């Protein structure tokens, strides 16, 4: 019944794309101090008089209206991140200064949460395998193709219209409905694609734009994409291992050979002797172990927990499954519908897949894997998803307002080289480098937060080649600084 109701809402009476009625605001159920509403947009922007979809929007008004600077629209990435709930929890993400001076507006992108979510069958693997044979590869492709067909049946037409170019046009519709001549934008992670495309399409509507943790949408060959992520993940793990094994780190493995322990665990994973302490029903594969390392090592605030995790793996007895959990028939899963509509990766056959896997292992000889890279490249093979918004170099007008890019030096999710490539294509842009580890610097580094806030509040950019020092990693004890940089 709920799916039918969603489809009914999706196929509502068309609204002309040129119309921009103001948003009807109401107090949000979760927090009455935040306003919730929706903006109706064409399902297919190429057919503005066709079916429509309602985009859920939330607004937290400026706490100091007398000093209000305008509207700050944000997207925290994903793909599939929710913006309405993030607006309600805005104090966890943004500084008091921004909350005082801007109306903060978040939205659920089409296919996500309150904007007609993409639903997929539960209990079906939604990440790609590491096939050992051409037949296993063929079976994997058939499985994900069937998965997409089931998702489409559960989700309706939004499944085929979740690309980021469409979302960029949705943002412009939100701006018009807000009645703002220009908007400021903060775009994180996968949201940087949205920010880049919005600035390309509507540069005259941009007051300021922050792009943090950048993806490069001009990359067309899978090997470079995969090896950049694998190489950075390997570097980040090495930094973690050095810290955790240090004599004064306070890590559970202090004074021990952390890298050597990881190698031993990889051998045990190859023999099927490990289960993940967090997911005891799952036999841990080497790929899963590498993926957990990529995740934990990439967030320095979790380094102490990562040491505990590796200790638990080392000390576990022969594990037993605890029984499976009941799951619903369908779950939200917009990742593939969005990512694979934005990226097309040419892999001709299984032999080429093997070559890519070998390239990953050369780039990361210890981890031998990149979970995020493999998911994003191999996970888009065989899909029943049209790549409506494929990779290409964006063409920015020379009068595009100056844009601030921010990226960690060591970020396995969005390697620094991606941000360098994007910055070179945007006229008058500045890249601020955080000389540490992590994906979201604004919530970690006082230096990058100050630079981002200063730009959004005053439009003042850091100097060329500016950088911020790494924040010292702390656990039960203090690890001290990792790297140093130039404060902008």
Image: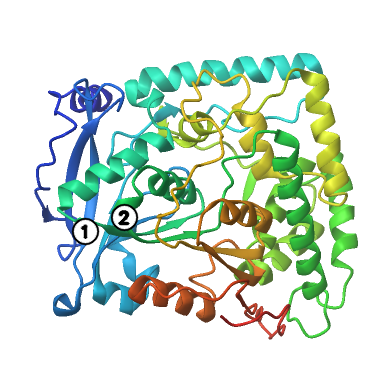
Position of 312 relative to 137 (above/below): below
**Mark positioned earlier in the residue sequence (1 or 2):** 1
Q: Can the viewer see residue 272 in this picture?
A: no
Give the structural element (helix, strand or loop) at label 1. Answer: strand
Q: Nearer the viewer, residue 391 or 402?
A: 402
Q: Nearer the viewer, residue 10 or 135?
A: 10
Identity of the residue drawn at 40% across and 49% down: 199
Give the structural element (helix, strand or loop) at label 2. Answer: helix
Q: Residues within 10 Å of mark 2 (few under 14, many from 20)?
A: some
Give x and y (percent) for residue 141.
64, 18
Q: Quadrant of residue 235?
A: bottom right
Display colour scheme: rainbow
In the picture as drawn, the residue positioned furthest to the front comes out as 398
Q: Which residue is mark 1?
A: 59
Cα distance between the residues tagged 1 and 2:
11 Å
Identity of the residue drawn at 72% across and 45% down: 370
Q: Residues within 10 Å of mark 1 (few under 14, many from 20)?
A: many
Q: Quadrant of the C terminus?
A: bottom right
Position of 176 relative to 477 (above/below): above
Residue 85's mark? 2
Residue 182's mark? none
Give x and y (percent) for residue 335.
49, 37
Give x and y (percent) for residue 223.
75, 37
């Amino acid at each position: 019944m709920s799916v039918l109701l969603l489809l009914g809402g999706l196929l509502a009476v068309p609204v002309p794309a040129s119309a921009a009625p103001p948003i009807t605001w109401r107090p949000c159920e979760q927090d009455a101090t935040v306003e919730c509403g929706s903006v109706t947009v064409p399902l297919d922007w190429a057919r503005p008089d066709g079916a429509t979809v309602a985009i859920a929007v939330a607004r937290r008004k400026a706490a100091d209206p007398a000093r209000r600077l305008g509207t700050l629209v944000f997207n925290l990435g994903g793909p599939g991140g929710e913006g309405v709930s993030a607006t309600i929890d805005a104090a966890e993400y943004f500084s008091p200064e921004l909350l005082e001076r801007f109306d903060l507006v978040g939205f659920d992108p089409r296919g996500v949460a309150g904007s007609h979510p993409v639903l997929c069958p539960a209990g079906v693997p939604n990440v790609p395998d590491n096939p050992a044979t051409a037949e296993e590869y063929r079976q994997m492709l058939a499985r994900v193709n069937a998965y997409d067909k089931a998702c489409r049946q559960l989700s309706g037409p939004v499944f085929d219209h979740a690309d980021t170019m469409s979302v960029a046009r949705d943002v412009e519709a939100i701006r018009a409905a807000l009645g703002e001549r220009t908007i400021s934008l903060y775009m994180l992670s996968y949201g940087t694609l949205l920010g880049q495309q919005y600035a390309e399409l509507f540069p005259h509507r941009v007051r300021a734009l922050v792009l943090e943790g950048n993806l490069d949408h001009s990359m067309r060959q899978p090997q470079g994409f995969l090896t950049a992520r694998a190489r950075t993940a390997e570097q980040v793990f090495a930094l973690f291992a050095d810290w955790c094994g240090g004599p004064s780190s306070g890590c559970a493995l202090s004074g021990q050979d952390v890298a050597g322990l990881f190698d031993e665990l990889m051998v045990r994973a190859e023999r099927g002797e490990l289960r993940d302490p967090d997911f005891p029903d799952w036999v841990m594969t080497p790929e899963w172990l590498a993926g957990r390392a990529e995740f934990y090592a990439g967030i320095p605030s979790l380094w102490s927990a990562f040491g505990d995790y590796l200790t638990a793996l080392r000390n576990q007895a022969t594990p037993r499954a605890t029984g499976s959990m009941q799951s619903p028939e369908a779950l939200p899963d917009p990742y593939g519908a969005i990512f694979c509509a934005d990226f097309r990766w040419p892999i001709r056959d299984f032999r080429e897949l093997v070559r890519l896997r070998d390239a990953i292992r050369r780039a990361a000889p210890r981890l031998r894997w990149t979970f995020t890279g493999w998911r994003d490249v191999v996970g888009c093979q065989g899909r029943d998803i049209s790549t409506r918004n494929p990779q290409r170099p964006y063409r920015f007008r020379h009068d595009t307002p100056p844009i601030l890019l921010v990226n960690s030096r060591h970020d396995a999710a969005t390697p620094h080289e991606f941000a360098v490539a994007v910055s070179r294509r945007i006229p008058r842009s500045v890249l601020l480098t955080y000389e540490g580890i992590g994906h979201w610097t604004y919530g970690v580094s006082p230096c990058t937060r100050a630079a981002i806030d200063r730009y959004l509040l005053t439009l003042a950019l850091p100097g060329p080649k500016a950088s911020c020092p790494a924040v010292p990693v702390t656990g039960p004890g203090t690890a001290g600084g990792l790297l140093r940089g130039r404060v902008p």
